[in-house]
Amino acid sequence: RTVMLRFMAGWTVGDKLSRSKCDPYEQGGKPLEKAKVKELLKTIKEDWSVDKENSRISRTFHFSNGDSALSFLPLVTNISANSNHNPEEIVARPSSPSSPQVIVTLHTPALNGLSYADFLLALKIDAALDSLHGSK
């Protein structure tokens, strides 16, 4: 699995990029530029989307039942805590009529935009969910 993650994103846990802290001086104190965001979007699952301002990425996770949706929340918060980077917003809709869902939005407030940490967190969330479901 580590080799696959390295191939997909160009970094993995333990690499210099994965250990970097998110602070106002990261990336020269500026958010990622549009071209870099477009490039990094290719390294995470296509279910992630970027907003019009190019300052947030989000993904809606669908579940078969409300309990599964709610059990996903601690997974995201644990990964976030261990990564020292938190989602801007997590919205759980365990009783949605169409299907239970959780929406995760990532953003780096210190940069007022996106950082490498946002994409690394997205990659970690996807990998953890894949390992729970046994998919590649």
Image (cartoon, rainbow, N blue to C red):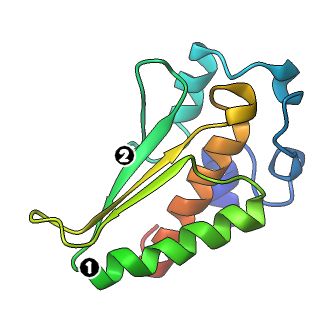
**Left or right of 56 in this view: 68:** left
Amino acid type assigned to the residue bearing label 2 in the image? Asp
Give the labeled residue for mark 1: 66
Q: Give the image quarter of residue 117.
A: top right
In the image, residue 107 lies at what x, y percent? 60, 38
Q: Give the image quarter of residue 27.
A: top right
Residue at image location 64% in from the left, 43% down from the top: 118
In the image, residue 38 lies at what x, y percent? 52, 23
Q: Nearer the viewer, residue 9 or 86?
A: 86
Mark 1, secondary structure of its residue: helix
Residue at image location 51% in from the left, 21% down from the top: 54
Q: Is residue 134 visible?
A: no
Q: Are marks 2 and 1 in contact (CB under 8 Å)?
A: no
Amino acid type assigned to the residue bearing label 1 in the image? Gly
> Going by the picture, which residue comes out furthest to the bottom?
67
Q: Nearer the viewer, residue 102 or 40?
A: 102
Disc 2 versus disc 1: nearer the observer: 1
Q: Is residue 135 above or below residue 107?
A: below
In the image, residue 26 lies at what x, y percent? 85, 30
Q: Give the image quarter of residue 71.
A: bottom left
Q: Earlier in the sequence, mark 2 or mark 1?
A: 2
- Quadrant in which the N terminus appears: bottom right
Residue at image location 81% in from the left, 41% down from the top: 22
In the image, residue 23 lies at what x, y percent? 85, 37
Residue at image location 64% in from the left, 52% down from the top: 121
Give the labeled residue for mark 2: 47
> Going by the picture, which residue comes out furthest to the left?
97
Q: Is residue 24 above or below residue 8?
A: above
Q: Nearer the viewer, residue 1 or 110?
A: 110
**Left or right of 29 in this view: 69:** left
CA distance for labels 2 and 1: 20 Å
Q: Is residue 35 visible?
A: yes
